[in-house]
Structure formats: structure tokens, C-alpha cells
Image (cartoon, rainbow, N blue to C red):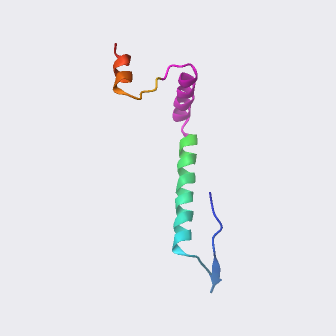
Amino acid sequence: MLDLIKVEQFDNKVIMPKEDFEKIIADVESLMETVEILSDKDLIEQLKESEKNIKDGKVKKIKSKKDIEALFS
């Protein structure tokens, strides 16, 4: 997740390379998305149901046109 970043302090300010700052922002945004997803009870329930459907064999892999046609025959 977060890598080591080079930070300097100058005149009571923290200075870091722009690339490191952008990496921190991207990581924070990713964490916020994760929290948002995990906070959505309906979405978590849908994920659990999908996992159950996969485990129960209710999900079909489609690798070709023939696989699609088999679903409707």
C-alpha cells in the first residue's frame, strides 16, 4: 500500500516530491472507496449471494459463442 516516501521539513512545512504526494492521494482515495463499499450493507449482501451462487454452480463461464447459445437452448 503506502511505500516509503522522502519527506523534508523546512520552515515548519513538510516537503515531499510531487510523485509521492500523488501516491498518497491515490492510496487515500482507494481506502475511502473500500470503506464506502464495506459500509454498503446491500452491496455486501449481494456479494455474499454471488459467492454462494458461484459455490453452488449457478454461475456459468462463457468463453465462446457456443457457450452463449447453450444458455438459450
Q: Name the one closer to the observer, 42 or 52.
A: 52
| Residue ID at (63%, 74%) | 6
- Tell me which segment is drawn in magenta: 40-59
| Residue ID at (51%, 34%) | 43
Q: In what quadrant of the picture does the N terminus appear?
A: bottom right
Residue at the farthest bottom position: 11
| Residue ID at (56%, 47%) | 34
Q: Is residue 32 above or below residue 45?
A: below
Figure quadrant of residue 14:
bottom right
Image-based side of 46 in relation to 4, left or right:
left
Q: Is residue 66 above or below residue 4?
A: above
Residue at the farthest top position: 73
Q: Name the one closer to the observer, 51 or 45.
A: 51
Q: Name the one closer to the observer, 6 or 12.
A: 6
User: Residue 51 lies in magenta, yes or no?
Assistant: yes
Q: Is residue 20 above or below residue 42?
A: below
| Residue ID at (34%, 16%) | 72
Q: In what quadrant of the picture does the C terminus appear?
A: top left
Can you give x and y, in whole percent of width and height, for residue 3 in the image? Answer: 63, 64
Can you give x and y, in whole percent of width and height, for residue 50 in the image? Answer: 52, 27
User: Residue 63 lies in magenta, yes or no?
Assistant: no
Can you give x and y, in whole percent of width and height, for residue 4 in the image? Answer: 66, 67
